[in-house]
Amino acid sequence: MQNDENNRSGLGLLRYIWTEWISTFVILMLLLLTLIIGTGEMIHGQLLRVGERLYGNEQIGMQYSFLRAEPVKPSCDRHPDIDAQVQQQMKANANDEFADIFGTTSAADVRASVLAGQQQCEEKYLFYDKAIKHMDDHPTLRSYRTLETSFFGVFKFGTENRVIILLLMVVVAAITASVKFHHIGLRAPTSKLDYRVYALFMVLGNGLLSASVLSQYHSIINSGVTSTYETLVVYWLWIFLFVTLTLISLLQFFKPPAVKQEEKGNLGLALLSVPLYAYMALVTGIAFTFVMDYPMGQGIYLGILVEFSGIFLNLALFIWAGMLLTQTRVMDLFLGILRPWNLAPETLTWLILIAAAIPTAYTGASGIFVVAAGAIIYKEVWNSGSRRQYALAVSAMSGSLGVVIRPCLLVILISMLDSRHVTSDELFDHGIYVFWLTAFIFLGVSLYLAETRFRVNSPKVAVPGMLKAIIPVIPYIVITIVVIAFYKYGLDTKMDEFTAPVILPIILLAYMMFDKWWGDRFATPPDRHAALTLEHEKQSTFMREHTAHAGEKSRGFGHSLWFASAETVGHIGALIILMALSASVGGLIERSEVVELLPTHLGNIYISLAFIALLLAIIGMTTDPFGAVILVAATIAPVAYENGIHPIHFWMIVLVAFELGYVTPPVALNHLLTRMSVGDEEVRAADAEAKVKYTKFYYRYERWLLPIMVLFPSLLIVTYAPYIFKLFNWYH
C-alpha cells in the first residue's frame, strides 16, 4: 500500500485520510481523555472541597454534599390525625394472626410510634425548607453544582470505560501500524519478496488470532452466564481488530508496495523482515490450537492487556510525552549548559545517560524510553562529535540504567507479585548500587575505546558560558515547578510513578506553548558544534527533520501537537500490540510447563547463578518486561529461592539480565525500537558509513557490541559479587 502514498485517489486517498487524519485525531482525543481521567479524580476532589467552602454552613448544619442533587419534597403527611392513625394501627394489630401468641402492642406504644414518625416527617420538611432557602440565598450554587456533577459524569464515564478506551486506542493504532508497515521486525522490508513474505505471515498470524478470539467469544456466549456489556464490547473490538488486520495483510499480499529499486530478494532476508508480532502470533497460535487443543489460548492471554489496562494507558501517555518532547527545545537548551565545557562525546554521553535514568524510572521500562526519547539522544550524541554507530548504541541502551532506581513501576510490580519475599524499598535501596555500577562500567568502556583522548575546558572558560546558557532554561524550570506545585498544592497530588504519566504530558504541552509563542524572546547560546550539526543535516534526512534548523521548529503549536500525535500512533500500534503478544508467549511457556523441567536443586551455587542468569537473559530477548516479570515470579523465582539465592539478589539479577537480553541479538528489542525511532534509512546509512570509514571489527559493529560490553560485565558482577564478598549482607 505504500505505493499509493503519493496517490490521492482510490486506496492512496483512503490510506492518506486514515493515517494522516482519522487515526491521528482519534488517538489524540483518546490521549486527552486519558489525561482527563487521570486528573479527573484529583480535580473532582478539589471541586467538592471548594463547593464545601463556598456553600457549606456549619452553623445551620448544611453541607454542599447534601445539595449535589436537587432536594426532593417529602411525600409524608406533615400534619396527620394522630388518634385516627393510632386506632387504625390497633385494629391492624388485633387482626394479626400471631396476636394470640405474641400479644398486641399497647395503645401508648402505638401512639409513641406514630408520634415518632410524625417527628421524622417534620424533620424531613424542615431540612427540605432549609435546603431550598439555602439554595435561594446562594443563586450560584446550582450553576456550580452543574459544573461539578458534569465533570464527575465525564470522569465516571472514563473510569468505568478505561478498558474500552485502551482497546479503541490499540485498534486504531494497530491498524495504522499495519497500513504503514510500522510493526517491529529484525530488518525493514526492501524488496517485493520481502513485502509478500511479510504480508503472508501477517495474514496467517492475524488469522490465528481472529480464530482464537472468536473461539473464546463463542465459549463465553455459550457458557450460560450473562456477560456484561463491557465484556462483549471487549470481544467485539478484538474480533474487529484481528479480522481487519487479516484483510489488510491479505490486500498487501496481493498488492505489495512499489520499491524504489527492484531487487530480486532473498527468502532468508525476507523472513527477517517479518514482524516479531507475526512470529509470536504464529508460534502461540499453532501451539495452542494444534498441539494443546486450546484454541482460545491466545485470546485468554490477551486478557493481560485488559487486566493491566491502567499500565498500558500510562505507556501510551509516556510515548506521547516523548513525541511531544521532540517538538520542544528543552533537550537542546539543557545540553547547552554542558557545551561550554567542551566535553568529549563519551563523557557528555555518560552524563546524558545518567540524566535519562530519571525519566526511564518513571516509564518503568527501557523500551518505552527508547521509543520516547531514543531519537533525541541519537541526535544529540552524534552532533556532539561522536561516531554514528556510537550514537545508535547509546540510544539502544539509553533506558537500561534507570530500571533499578526509584520510582520504577517495574520494581513496584515485582514487589506486588513477590510481596512475601521483597519490598519495593529494599529493591530500590540495592538498585542504586546496580545503577552506579553499570554507569561507571559504561564510562570506563567508552573512554577506553574512544578515538580521541579525554578533554574538558577549564572552569575559567566554561563557567561564564555555562551561566549564560542557564538563562534560556529558567522559563522551563519555572514551568515545571508551577505544574508540579499545582498538582501538589492545588490537587494534593505529588509526582510519582503513578501520576507521572499524567503530569509529564501536561508539562511538555506547556513547554510547547512557551516555545511556539514566547521562546524566540530567549536567545539560544551559540552551539560549539553548529558546523558539525549542519554537516550532519546534509548527510541525513532524519537530522534535517529533527534539528533546530529544520522545519519542525517553525511549526505552530497546533501543528506541532498534531505532528507529535501522528508519530505516537504508529509507535503505540507497534509496541503495545507486540507487548500483548509477548504476554501470550509467556502464557505458552507457563502452560507448557517447560520451566518445571528445571531441577529444583542445581547443586553448586555458582552453577545455579550462571544457569538462572542465562535463562533470564533469554527470556529478556523474547518477552516484554511486564509480561516477563509476571512469568518469572510464578516460575523461576521459586527455583532460585530453593537453590539458596536471596530474593533481593535474584531480582537484581533479573533486572540486569532483562536489559542484557533487550540489546543482544538475534532479537535485541531495544535496537529494533531505536531503529523505529530514528528510521531504517538512518540505521542503514550508519552501518554503511562505518564499513567505509573503519577497518576494526569493533567500530564497524559498535552499535551491537558496546551495550553488550557494558551490560554483560554488569550482569556478571551483580550475579557473583554479592555472594563472593557478601555485599549488602544478602547472604548469612
Image (cartoon, rainbow, N blue to C red):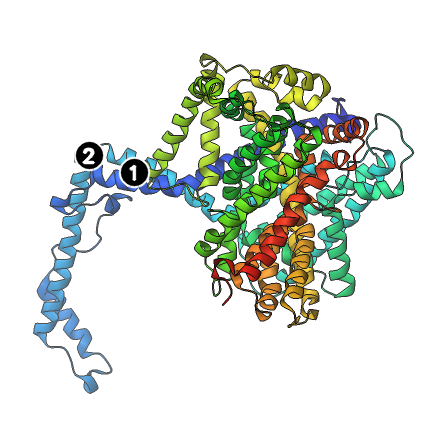
7 vs 491: above or below: above
Whether label 2 touches label 1, CB < 8 Å: no
Answer yes or no: is residue 238 visible. Answer: no
Is disc 2 placed on a helix, strand or loop? loop
Q: Residue at x 12, y 45 (%)?
A: 60
Give the CA separation, mark 2 to mark 1. 12 Å
For residue 118, side relative to residue 277 (left or right): left
Q: Amino acid at mark 2?
A: His
434 vs 468: above or below: below
Residue 143 horizontal/vertical position (percent): 29, 33
For residue 653, side relative to residue 3 (left or right): left
- The outermost residue toward the right is 264
Residue 612 horizontal/vertical position (percent): 65, 61
330 vs 187: above or below: above
The residue closer to the viewer here, 148 or 678, is 678
The residue closer to the viewer here, 443 or 29, is 443
Residue 145 circle label: 1
Instruction: Report how many numbered discs are placed on residues in the image.
Output: 2
- Residues packed near mark 2 inside 10 Å, few (<14), some (14 to 19) or many (20 plus): few
Is disc 1 placed on a helix, strand or loop? helix
Q: Residue at x 56, y 21 (%)?
A: 559
Q: Residue at x 74, y 41 (%)?
A: 185
For residue 348, side relative to residue 271 (left or right): left
Query: Where is the N terminus found, in terms of image quarters?
Result: top right
Q: Amino acid at mark 1?
A: Arg
Q: Which residue is mark 2?
A: 138
For residue 659, side relative to residue 100 (left or right): right
Answer yes or no: is residue 56 visible. Answer: yes
